[in-house]
Amino acid sequence: MFTLEGCRARRKRLWDCVPESVEWLLAADPRHVRYLSGFMVNPFSFSHGERGWLLLEREQGATLLADNFAIRSAIGEIFADREVVEAWYNHQTSVINRDHALLAALNSVAERLYGREGAVEAEWLPVGAWEILGLDRESHSVTDEGRDGVEPGRAVDLGTLIRGLRRQKEVDEISLLEMCMRATEAGHVRAREVIRQGMSEFDVYCAVQQAALEAAGRPAIVYGDFRANNAQMPKAGGLPTGYRLQAGDLFILDYSVVIDGYRSDFTNTLAVGDASDEQRMLMSVLQSAMEHGEAVLNPGTPAKEVYAAASTPIRESGLGAGIPHHAGHGLGLGHPEPPILVSESDDVLMVGDVITLEPGLYLEGSGGIRIEHNYLIMEDGYQRLSNHTISLD
């Protein structure tokens, strides 16, 4: 679960990245409000899709802005110094435009921001918010003074800055990600127990979802690839269908469990019936690709070097020039997130990254196989966070 200490640490890192002249920040992306205060509307509530905004001030701390029904639908404890709650529905009168309730909450704090330098998350603010704050498109930016890889004096908007900070996970974020991992592992165990000829892709999805939710002990979102492939159609992805599994099929189980906004993402491929010798060879090559990728998972390693390392066994086996898609990617509040492990990536691994390694091969005449683990990048290498079995059987 999120903690006060984690939210304070994330806010401090944010403040450390902006000039001292900036006195206030307004976060509006629901993921970033979650990241900095713990507040997010429960996706299983009738307020799903609604949001709040978070005002951060150097001297006055954090203020959450929301309507009365959004705030009562929060997924957990809110770590803000104060809340400004605007009535949207009172069970007595007609509701107002719900977006206007959020604008009214902002209007109630706007006066104390006038004349002070600040930054807003421009992509997520409607025109009405700009008018309330008296801002134009030139006045919202934070001037970055010397962060690595950014030229001094270059304008960086608040959303981009927070997205960069999200890569380095705090302890409470890692704990939440591990909850996602345990639930995902339970689904993989169930799949190994139930997959058989004649079962539909949707049947497999239902069994996996049930096991994941039971392990999570709470409602959670389960999404990903629940599709079979075969020698004639070696690559298929997306939501499950009514297709019934046949002997010789390969079932790629690549899915995420989302708990309180954070997510896992790991994969195994299961054979329906007995796997062929060629399919076992493909799996062996991919397991070697994963081991080669793991060998270079260190802070400071360029993402393109991880891709190159993981691609080496595929190239040496004559099965292709390399992994035909990314070799992995970052995880957290989004999917995928930086770093992106591809041949021309500019990303570099850093301490606190949570990433995947995801080699795959899809060959006509054999079928498609993909495997994937999740890792935390640490000062001395990595910690593997996912513990599911990778095997065709």
Image (cartoon, helix red, strand yellow):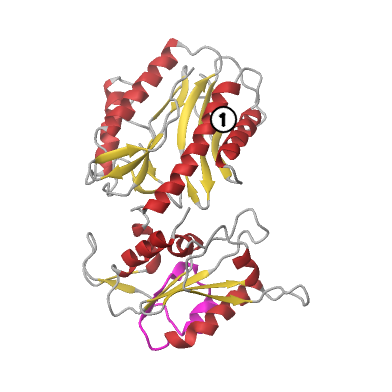
**Quadrant housing residue 162:** bottom left
Query: Which of the two residues, 49 or 208, is positioned nearer the viewer here?
Result: 208
Q: Which residue: 44% across, 82% down?
A: 135
Decide whether residue 305 is among the magenta residues. Answer: no
List x then y, in percent, for residue 317.
Answer: 30, 19
List x then y, in percent, for residue 136.
Answer: 42, 81
In the image: residue 369, left or right of residue 215? left
Residue 298 vertical placement versus 108 (above, below): above
The residue under label 1 is which amino acid type? Arg
Query: Which of the two residues, 320 or 292, is positioned nearer the viewer here?
Result: 292
In the image: residue 304, left or right of residue 160? left
The extreme right residue here reads 92
List x then y, in percent, for residue 288.
Answer: 31, 24
The answer to whether any part of residue 49 appears in the image is: yes
Residue 71 vertical placement versus 195 (above, below): below
Residue range (magenta): 114-137
The answer to whether any part of residue 255 appears in the image is: no
List x then y, in percent, for residue 202.
Answer: 65, 31
**Which residue is the site of mark 1?**
227
In the image: residue 205, left or right of residue 234? right
